């Protein structure tokens, strides 16, 4: 075979491999916020806000009936949330998940440095879970010369 043709085939193969890897990365990135494969559960939407000496986490738990369906714990420096859905959630519009149903939420969030684990408080109202984490703030006086 001609050398130019072999180079062309090798370049084509490299480009094809790059595209395949990029598609796999995009699929993982796009699907990551939707479900937790390891736990077979939906990953809820949440936001984290730092306000003074506390961190506030708000978690959207649509479909969770009451606070009794929520389990919140601290494990190895992570806040671990599990919540049971009132009705199973079926996915039909996403090819990769077609026919899969979810019955719970699962979320793990690293606690901020200085978190006072034994003073964490949570409240559940209208499908929203609000978690307040007090944080020790280390303050050091700096001498100005």
Image (tube, rainbow, N blue to C red):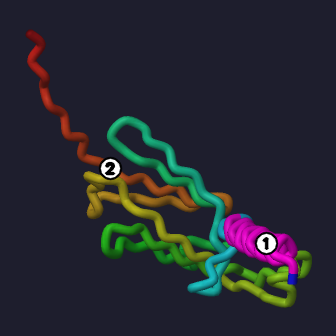
Q: Residues within 10 Å of mark 1 (few under 14, many from 20)?
A: few
Residue 23 lies in the magenta-colored region: yes
Residue 115 at x, y percent in the picture? 29, 55
Q: 51 or 6, which is in the foreground?
A: 6
Q: Name the residue at 85% across, 90% down.
A: 99
| Residue highlighted by disc 2 | 134
Tell which residue pokes out farthest to the bottom in this image.
99
Tell which residue pokes out farthest to the top in this image.
145
Mark 1 and mark 2: Cα distance apart in space:
61 Å
Q: Name the residue at 25% across, 41% down.
A: 137
Taking 2 as reference, is 114 left or right?
left
Residue 106 at x, y percent in the picture? 57, 76
Assign the C terminus to one quadrant of the image: top left
Tell me: residue 67, above or below residue 115. below
Q: Main secondary structure of the magenta part?
A: helix
- Disc tally is 2
Q: What range is drawn magenta here?
A: 2-29
Give the secondary structure at mark 1.
Answer: helix
Residue 59 at x, y percent in the picture? 59, 59
* Location of residue 15 (image quadrant): bottom right
* Residue 34 visible from this viewpoint: no
Taking 21 as reference, is 76 left or right?
left
Assign the N terminus to one quadrant of the image: bottom right
Q: 33 or 47, which is in the foreground?
A: 33
Q: Name the residue at 12% across, 25% down.
A: 141
Taking 111 as reference, is 42 left or right?
right
Q: Residues within 10 Å of mark 2 (few under 14, many from 20)?
A: many
Taking 45 as reference, is 48 left or right?
left
Tell me: residue 103, above or below residue 138. below
Give the secondary structure at mark 2.
Answer: strand
| Residue highlighted by disc 1 | 7
């Amino acid at each position: 075979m001609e050398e130019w043709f072999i180079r062309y085939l090798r370049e084509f193969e490299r480009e094809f491999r790059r595209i395949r890897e990029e598609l796999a990365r995009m699929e993982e990135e796009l699907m990551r916020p939707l479900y937790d494969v390891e736990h077979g559960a939906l990953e809820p939407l949440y936001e984290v806000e730092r306000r003074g000496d506390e961190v506030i986490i708000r978690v959207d738990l649509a479909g969770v009936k009451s606070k009794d369906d929520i389990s919140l714990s601290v494990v190895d420096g992570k806040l671990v949330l599990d919540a049971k859905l009132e009705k199973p959630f079926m996915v039909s519009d996403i090819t990769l998940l077609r026919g899969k149903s979810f019955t719970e939420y699962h979320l793990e969030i690293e606690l901020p440095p200085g978190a006072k684990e034994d003073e964490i408080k949570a409240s559940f109202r209208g499908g929203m879970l609000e978690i307040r984490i007090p944080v020790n703030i280390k303050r050091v006086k700096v001498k100005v010369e």
